[in-house]
Amino acid sequence: MSEITSKFTVKEWEQLAQLFDEKVNLHLLYKASVHGFDGKSFHAKCDGQGPTFTVGYNTSGYVFGGYTSEDFITDGNKKDNKAFLYRLYNAWRRAKFAVKPNAVAVCNHLEHGPNFGDSLVFLADGNKITYTSGPSYCVDEKDLFGGDVNLSECEVYRVEKLKTPWRTMTWNEPWRKQSLIQSINSYKLYRCSVPQARILLIGPVGGGKSSFINSVNSVFRGNVTNRALAGGGAINGTKMFRTYSFGNADGKSPPLILCDTMGISEGTEWGIHSDDIISIIKGHVPKRYQFNTTSPIEPDTKGYIKSATIGERIHCVVYVLDASKPTLLSPEMEKKMCTIQSQINDLEIPQVVLLTKVDEACPLVGEDVTNVYRSEHIEKKVLEVGKKLSVPVSCIFPVKNYWLDINGDDPTDMLIISAVLQMLRYADDYFQNLDD
Ligand SMILES: Nc1nc2c(ncn2[C@@H]2O[C@H](COP(=O)(O)OP(=O)(O)OP(=O)(O)O)[C@@H](O)[C@H]2O)c(=O)[nH]1
Ligand SMILES: [Mg+2]
């Protein structure tokens, strides 16, 4: 959901279907009158966002712009045979102008806003349009925007489409959810001497770790619950090491403990100390340990568990990341996470990724969670995080947590519960590796 209001009218919205020949959704990324009529502000909001639709409004009432299926970047030219310029019906009838075969469709300069092949350039000179009837698109400025170069607004939207699912899930068979819950309840861990697999959730502040624990509890209980304090950050964020086991109304409890931690922060003034993450994994940190941002737990700290049993150690680590963030991991966060990850790799702990807030990241998923594996945008985020953390796509789970609704629903439950089942299976890999 965008906090800024789109200038796009219903009449303009209706014309999108003719431009794209398929159902698309637009997510507002940038609005010049709010973020600034300049190239740097545009690039800060729009780079790396995938396919985009730029809408310009000039003082003569023309609504026009361009589409590219390529990412905007800070520098460099791109070819894109799907790109086009357009004029919507407003001042004049609707028209679409395709890019010429093999021509440069998009030119990226830090000082320019959206630049379509150096033909139509927004914000190169504040709120002016630059137009050169160039080699890339066949249209003149009179035809495109009535020759009036004074821009009153410029908006850039991410274009979201649905595609063939990249992961299969059968949503419409009610017994399937019960069967997943049953598989977890009756799950027999490889190492019989360990009664419950301990799964640790770590990740940036506010990523949705505590909300995931509440969501898992909600699935087992059959109604939305709120055991872990959620809200994120300094006020409602997690400050204590907490472990949660789960029980059903009928008294069954799955062989599973989820461990909640304080979030990782970019700076040093807040957030879990990375040494504490490793101490938790090794089983040294007692329940309800109050995290101290500046100094990690030491062997002489009260409650420190000196010789932890296998059952007290962590058997699977879950990185919880917010899919709705324009940049999944900032360069500082990526560096911090990779340093932690390399220590976790040395301990040979299986790792998975939970991508939360998919409802916020893609409006098509917000509308209907069964679109999650059909959303191009979510797939892009999954591939991005897989690359950044070197985790195979099969270990990445997009989920929507219960954070707003008071009633659960089957598709949301199924995403949550199938991620948990996979975590149990990965924990078993750890036990199996111990024996080898
Ligand atoms: N839209 C949406 N919001 C979510 C989702 N999951 C969590 N949130 C919201 O994100 C905020 C932070 O969630 P938390 O679960 O507290 O995050 P956390 O990772 O535990 O935060 P720290 O404990 O500070 O590290 C809360 O306001 C939640 O309501 C989700 O799947 N979708
Ligand atoms: Mg928390």
Image (cartoon, rainbow, N blue to C red):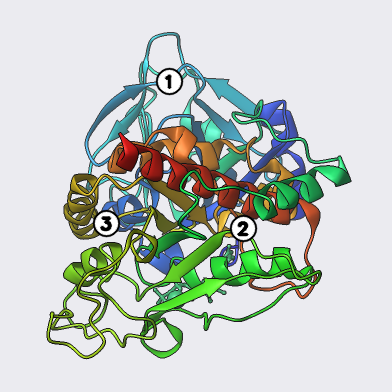
Residue on which the image places disc 3: 330
Who is closer to the viewer here, 173 or 192?
A: 192
Q: Nearest the camera: 272 or 306?
A: 306
Residue in front for this viewpoint, 155 or 187 = 187
* SS state under label 1: loop
Where residue 418 sits in the image (x, y, percent)?
A: 63, 46
Within 10 Å of disc 1 (Cα), the crowding (few <14, some 14-19, many 20+) is: some
Question: Which residue: 66% across, 44% down?
Answer: 25
Residue 208 showing in the rendered view? no
Q: CA distance from mark 1 to mark 3?
A: 28 Å
* Labelled disc at residue 265: none
Q: Three-letter amino acid code at disc 3? A: Ser
Q: What residue do we see at 57% from left, 54% from top?
A: 358
Does the Cβ of the disc 3 residue fall within 8 Å of ligand 1?
A: no
Q: Quadrant of the C terminus?
A: top left
The residue that label 2 is drawn on is 400
Image x and y of residue 6, in percent: 60, 61
- For the residues bearing labels 1 and 2, Cβ distance under 8 angstroms: no
Q: Is 41 situated above or below 305?
A: above
Q: Is mark 2 within 8 Å of ligand 1?
A: yes
Residue 91 falls in image quadrant: top right
